[in-house]
Image: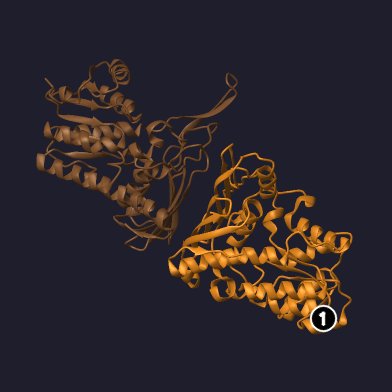
């Protein structure tokens, strides 16, 4: 009989939890053991939707002889959740950003190292076939020397705890910096050394910033801009985008990770929307993580990777406060 | 650009081309022939010999000031290509000289007359997006080749920040108001290698933020994009998606230009270069201030110069009014 990999879900506070659970359900070698959530209504509904058990206590879930847990709590609770899982000796897939602050992130990495628990951060964009294809083009040098990158990771204002900086660590910048910051490191091997940012609350009546524009300088001389704004109106045909354009001395490559879509015009509610048909990048992430659980290898995306990406967002916040570029 | 101006003056009912000036007399002669006009390689001589009302200046930027001051001293109305000058002092001196001479002075920030940009401005003014939060613009193609390769001489052209992005800076200032602070990264120093690229952040007095991309490193044709996001909506444009004509030939030799040009033809009456000249002629006739003043051009130049300063210093730069 195939070895069953036992996985639990810690919190459904982040909406990505549903997608990860669906991916886990599709894998025959995975047993989705349960959903733990202090919010009984949310956790109970999630458990029912994904044909698994609900646990009102994280500890009780962690006692179920798990191989791995997926942490999708509010960002500020990632340390607390990681500590529980590490104590329980269970490998972790933690939603991005790794944390709201660098100290917690470092503690998470240290705790997992001491407990010999593997910590992976969820950067599913690394599993987009288009993103991988352009990474290969960049790495093969087909664009010559890369001089600059223009990137956007924009969205609609998500609401809920995402706009409460005590729970999320900020607003649009912490939410949308880390994906592209991770991809740029992954593409080029370069580390961010300096960040300048402008930000504001421009579109919504919220406390957190909903407009953010970062300029990031890298140790190999590349500069990049990243628009992290929640600037997509409610009437926009899709949730947002992840777009990167690489400017090289021999050419230009753009990759629009979520552009594979059908246009849908509906008289039913007088709407225009996009129906994506691209590969499910969460499936790629989960398949890779389950493969890691099933082997002795290190995770593809480590806690350090998560910290490096977070540091770019944190430098952006310091830059906004000080009005000048900040070292990462 | 001189040929474009000449063609529109000639085609309009109230103006005609009487003289063409170029330091290369043969270039002046070749254009003059088209309009049965006289050719000159000396500006004073031209102004003395010909009965001229308007001088249109389309030299490389460093020669704008000398030409404007000479024409103003002779009492001629002046249309000057953008950027107005290489420095704000020069630009202000030119503006002041025209004011003192009592001649009309307009600077060709023609983007305001491009229908997509004019429509976007009108929509913004009508509240189509509400309060503006984030604007993104992009412009560029391959490195421009011109007489004497003067674009590769950043001392003459100022690279794409001064020569090309000033279009977007003027449109943004026209549409969103004054810029207070800029931060930018760019490759100005690579102009000699026929490469230039810049990513610019602008902060406006009204709080809005703009991201401006300028590139002379695109091998796949000239592209422009505009997106304006506000608290009530979003307007977006890119010239690829809105080009009504898309051509492809199996025989590449029949495609004509080696570099593809976005094919969005307009009726003659909507030609932006014609419209700016019509507005200029109208202002002269009505003895009104032309719609794009020397001061406007100086403000746009200030943004470009602040961007260059930010690129060179690595620091944000305040833009003072």
The quarter of the displayed image where residue B130 is located: top right
Residue A105 x %, y %: 23, 45
A282 relative to B43, above or below: above
Residue A67 x %, y %: 14, 29
Chain ID at mark 1: B
Along the line of sight, the residue nearer the viewer: A180 or B288: B288
Along the line of sight, the residue nearer the viewer: B263 or B80: B80
Residue B168 x %, y %: 60, 57
Residue A113 x %, y %: 13, 43
A146 relative to B104, above or below: above
Residue depicted at x 67% and y 42%: B123
Disc 1 target residue = B46
Please, what secondary structure does the residue beneath circle 1 have? helix
Whether residue B58 is visible, yes or no, is yes
Chain identity for the colour orange used in the image: B
Whether residue A293 is visible, yes or no, is no
Q: Label 1: how many residues lie within 10 Å, few (<14), some (14-19) or many (20+)?
A: some
Residue depicted at x 31% and y 39%: A96
Which quadrant does the C terminus of chain B fall into?
bottom right
Residue depicted at x 35% and y 57%: A141
The quarter of the displayed image where residue A98 is located: top left
| Coloring basis for residues | by chain
Along the line of sight, the residue nearer the viewer: A109 or A100: A100
Report how many numbered discs are placed on residues in the image. 1
Chain identity for the colour brown used in the image: A
The quarter of the displayed image where residue B50 is located: bottom right
Residue depicted at x 10% and y 43%: A114
Which quadrant does the N terminus of chain B fall into?
bottom right
Along the line of sight, the residue nearer the viewer: B226 or A133: B226
């Amino acid at each position: 009989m195939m070895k069953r990999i036992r996985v639990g879900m810690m919190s459904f506070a982040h909406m990505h939890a549903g997608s990860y659970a669906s991916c886990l359900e599709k894998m025959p070698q995975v047993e989705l053991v349960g959903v733990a959530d202090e919010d009984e209504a949310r956790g109970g509904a999630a458990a029912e939707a994904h044909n698994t058990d609900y646990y009102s206590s994280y500890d009780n879930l962690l006692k179920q002889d798990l191989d791995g847990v997926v942490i999708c709590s509010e960002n500020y609770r990632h340390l607390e959740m990681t500590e529980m899982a590490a104590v329980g000796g269970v490998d972790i897939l933690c939603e991005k950003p790794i944390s709201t602050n660098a100290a917690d992130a470092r503690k998470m990495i240290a705790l997992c190292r001491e407990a010999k628990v593997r910590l992976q951060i969820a950067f599913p964009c690394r599993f987009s076939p288009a993103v991988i294809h352009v990474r290969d083009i960049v790495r093969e040098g087909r664009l010559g020397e890369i001089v600059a990158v223009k990137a956007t990771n924009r969205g609609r204002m998500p609401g809920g705890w995402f706009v409460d900086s005590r729970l999320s660590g900020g607003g649009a910048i912490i939410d949308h910096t880390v994906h592209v910051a991770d991809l740029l490191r992954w593409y080029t091997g370069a580390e961010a050394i300096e960040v300048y940012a402008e930000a504001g609350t421009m579109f919504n009546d919220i406390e957190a910033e909903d407009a953010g524009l970062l300029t990031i300088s890298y140790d190999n001389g590349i500069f990049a801009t990243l628009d992290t704004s929640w600037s997509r109106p409610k009437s926009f045909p899709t949730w947002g985008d992840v777009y990167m354009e690489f400017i090289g001395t021999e050419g230009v490559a753009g990759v629009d990770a979520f552009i594979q879509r059908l246009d849908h015009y509906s008289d039913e509610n007088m709407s225009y929307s996009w129906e994506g048909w691209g590969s499910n990048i969460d499936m790629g992430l989960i398949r890779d993580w389950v493969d890691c659980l099933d082997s002795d290898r290190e995770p593809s995306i480590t806690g350090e990777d998560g910290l490096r990406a977070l540091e770019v967002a944190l430098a952006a916040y310091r830059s906004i406060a000080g009005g000048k570029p900040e070292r990462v | 650009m001189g040929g474009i101006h000449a063609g529109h003056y000639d085609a309009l009912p109230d103006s005609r081309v009487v003289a063409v000036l170029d330091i290369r007399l043969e270039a002046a002669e070749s254009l003059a022939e088209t309009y049965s006009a006289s050719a000159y390689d000396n500006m004073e001589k031209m102004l003395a010999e010909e009965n001229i009302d308007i001088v249109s200046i389309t030299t490389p930027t460093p020669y704008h000031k000398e030409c404007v001051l000479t024409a103003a001293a002779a009492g001629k109305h002046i249309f000057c290509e953008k950027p107005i000058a290489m420095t704000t002092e020069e630009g202000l001196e030119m503006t002041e000289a025209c004011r003192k001479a009592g001649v009309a002075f307009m600077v060709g920030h023609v983007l305001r007359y491009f229908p997509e940009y004019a429509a976007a401005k009108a929509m913004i003014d009508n509240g189509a997006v509400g309060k503006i939060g984030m604007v993104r613009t992009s412009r560029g193609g391959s490195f421009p080749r011109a007489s004497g390769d003067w674009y590769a001489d950043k001392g003459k052209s100022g690279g794409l920040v001064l020569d090309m992005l000033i279009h977007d800076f003027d449109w943004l200032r026209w549409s969103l108001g004054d810029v207070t602070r800029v931060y930018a990264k760019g490759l100005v120093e690579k102009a000699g290698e026929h490469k230039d690229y810049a990513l610019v952040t602008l902060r406006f007095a009204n709080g809005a933020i703009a991201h401006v991309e300028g590139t002379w490193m695109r091998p796949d044709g000239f592209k422009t994009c505009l997106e304006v996001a506000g608290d009530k909506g979003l307007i977006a444009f890119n010239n690829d998606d809105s080009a009504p004509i898309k051509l492809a030939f199996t025989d590449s030799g029949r495609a004509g230009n080696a570099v593809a040009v976005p094919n969005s033809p307009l009726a003659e009456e909507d030609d932006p270069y014609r419209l700016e000249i019509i507005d200029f002629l109208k202002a002269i006739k009505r003895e009104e201030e032309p719609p794009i003043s020397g001061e406007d051009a100086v403000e746009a130049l200030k943004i470009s110069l602040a961007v260059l300063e930010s690129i060179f210093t690595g620091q944000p730069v305040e833009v003072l009014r």
